[in-house]
Image (spheres, helix red, strand yellow):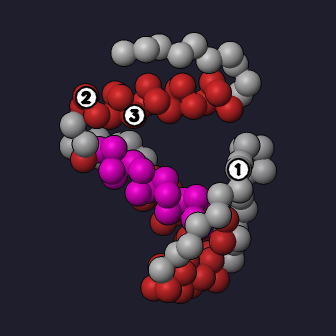
Amino acid sequence: MEDDHQVSALDRIVSRLEHSRESNPRVKSYAVHARLREDIYIMVEALTWYAGTSRNVIVNHLLDVAIERTLGALPLDVREELMARQEFLRDHLSGKKLEVVEE
């Protein structure tokens, strides 16, 4: 169960929608092309308008919430496996030499 004092991704997006109109340009980002269902696209556009920010900022915040909630619902062993894979990919993207481990 989530600690009441911990700020969740959902809290952050609500706060952004209510108060903030800026993004963080210091965070490294990657272009990802995806097709959105019409209902999702329309809501993203509505949230973008409401927040007075970019579609990119909204989509990133929505993904933060979705990933946080998804990871929280997974068994611990699956979360640990995903976190290890995330570290592997982070090393790959940062240019570190990857060691391939055969299983």
Residue 90 horizontal/vertical position (percent): 60, 30
Relative horizontal placement of residue 47, taking residue 56 as reference (left or right): left
The quarter of the picture where the C terminus appears is top left
Q: Residue at point 70% right, 19% down? A: 96
The quarter of the picture where the N terminus appears is top left
Q: Residue at point 29% right, 44% down? A: 72
Neighbours of disc 1 within 10 Å: few (<14), some (14-19), many (20+): few
Residue hosting label 1: 30
The reply to whether callout 2 and callout 1 are in contact (CB within 8 Å) is no
The magenta region covers 57-72
The reply to whether callout 3 and callout 2 are in contact (CB within 8 Å) is no
Q: Callout 3, which amino acid?
A: Leu
The front one of 62 and 17 is: 62
Q: Callout 2, which amino acid?
A: Asp
Marking on residue 77: 2
Q: Callout 1, which amino acid?
A: Tyr
The front one of 92 and 24 is: 92
Neighbours of disc 2 within 10 Å: few (<14), some (14-19), many (20+): few
Relative to 18, say whether 15 is above or below.
above
Which comes before the other along the chain, label 2 or label 1?
Answer: 1
Residue 23 horizontal/vertical position (percent): 71, 58
Marking on residue 82: 3
**Whole-number angstrom distance, CA of label 1 to CA of label 3:** 20 Å
Q: Residue at point 68% right, 32% down? A: 93
Relative horizontal placement of residue 1, taking residue 101 as reference (left or right): left
Q: Can residue 43 be seen here? A: no
Q: Residue at point 57% right, 31% down? A: 89
The reply to whether callout 1 and callout 3 are in contact (CB within 8 Å) is no
Q: What is the secondary structure assignment of the residue under circle 2?
A: helix
Residue 86 horizontal/vertical position (percent): 50, 32
